Image (spheres, rainbow, N blue to C red):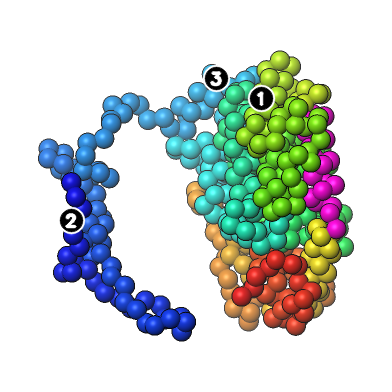
Amino acid sequence: MAPRPADPADQAVVPAHDSGERPHTRVAVDGRRAERWASTMSGHRRSGDAPLRHAHDIPPATLGRTPLHDRRAREDHEAATLAPGATLASGAGTRARPEPPHDLRTCFERDRDRILHRATAFRRLAGKTQVFIFPDDHQRTRLTHALEVAQVATAIAKAVGANVALTEAIALGHDCGHGPGGHASEDAFGPYVEGGYDHAVWGADVVLEPLNLCIETLDGIRNHSWSRPSPSTPEGEIVSWADRIAYVCHDFEDAVLAGIVTPDMLPDLVTDACGTARGAQLSTFIDAMVDTIGAHGEVAMDAPTAEVLAEFRRFNYEHIYMRPASVRQSEAVIAMLRALVEFFADRPNSMPIETGIIDPGSSTSAAGPALRSIAPTGSRPPRQAGGAAAVRAAVTYVAGMTDRYAVRSAVTHLGWDRHAIPAGVDIG
């Protein structure tokens, strides 16, 4: 059927944005389409099912009546189907502030959902560096990295009978402690934090603390880095491997697309084992994990494939992470972030009290502890300028910034020379 000719009566006309660069134009908006969209507001009613509303007016496939798969049913299913050493939701779920269990979701499903829906730090990962500051549209950010880690980790967890919900929760939250500018932020904040700044520890103990996550989830986030102690669960160990597998493969792909390296530069050991395409590389390492776990019962990778991954990572370090331009970028990030910490530590009452900080005097409900919203400067106890509390608050504040917001803050508050900001950042 030929498309219906546009009817002028169906169209509303609105002025287009006047940029000053072209004559002012008027753009037609299809009014009939808007009416169709609005007509779905309450869903569709079909004859004979007046109490029901449907998303579509064409009958969909039906599930048939079945008992609800509530929390207890899913916990029973885990006990019956997961591997002997997998972490079961039943008997877990210990939180710093006790909460009653949910009727439908397991404790680890709740953790995953809280990170996705309630953690502003998770959403801000979209504006934080993975490898390239202010990346092009096709390049990874910390957020897309977290999503790819979750995919790799759950692919492994499903195949070997680990707890998928716990694996997802750890993977999605594992990098929430990263500051702006990538790993350089850890060097920047290190002098201000006792024992140094570790994004894994900071993410679990500071950034995600308001979510009141389970101890198993926090442990996996806190210990996902290979330089940290081993996670207490196999799911945490799976995420540790998935993190390395994901970033080694996708950082190389981003560097190829940026023209920094070429596929034929990869060592023969790597290309002979897994090729030059990310899909084949991921499959090689994921399959090796699954086969090794299945054969030995331990979360590990066979030695030959592990050496391929190590050689791949060494290549990335030499040609991507530690190339002169990356080192200069890191030095610029460190200088900028330290200057911001010093600025705000000296003016502690200029920082907002951010939503998500636990109010010790608030009550705790089934939905979790009440949270404080941003309060005006005059409504809180003053912090002593330059004191330990002010410095920690400044680190917390600056570490939570996106790349762009940090640069804007440096330009606005410090009069930072735009030529001294990390290359590639567009602050408008």
Q: Element under label 1?
A: helix
First in residue order: circle 1 vs circle 3: 3
Residue furthest out toward the left: 47
Residue 263 rendering spot, x and y as whole percentages: 73, 41
Name the kind of residue labelled 3 in the image: Thr
| Residue beneath the point at 28% across and 68% down | 29
**Where does residue 53 sit, x and y in percent of width and height?**
23, 45
**Which label was assigned to residue 81?**
3
Looking at the image, tell me whether mark 2 or mark 3 is earlier in sequence order: 2
Residue at which label 1 appears: 287
Residue type at numbered disc 1: Asp
- From the top left corner, tell me how far across and down residue 102 is, in percent: 48, 40
Q: Is residue 273 left or right of residue 405?
A: right
Q: Quadrant of residue 187?
A: bottom right
Please say whether residue 175 is visible from this viewpoint. no
Q: Between marks 2 and 3, how big is the CA–CA gap?
A: 55 Å
Was residue 315 drawn as part of the magenta stretch in this picture? yes
Element under disc 3: helix
Instruction: Tell me the amino acid under the disc marked 2.
Output: Arg
Residue 134, can we see it?
yes
User: How many numbered dots are placed on residues in this image?
Assistant: 3
Nearer the observer: mark 1 or 3; the answer is: 1
Q: Is residue 377 above or below residue 331?
A: below
Q: State the residue position of label 2.
A: 4
Image mark for residue 95 = none
How many neighbours does mark 1 have within 10 angstroms: few (below 14), some (14-19), or many (20 or more)? some
Q: Position of residue 416 (x, y in %)?
A: 76, 79
> Hey, which quadrant is residue 167 in on the image?
top right
User: Residue at 25% across / 44% down in the picture?
Assistant: 56
Which residues make up the magenta segment?
306-324
Work out whether residue 175 or residue 244 is closer to the camera in this orientation and state it: 244
Say whether residue 324 is left or right of residue 4. Answer: right
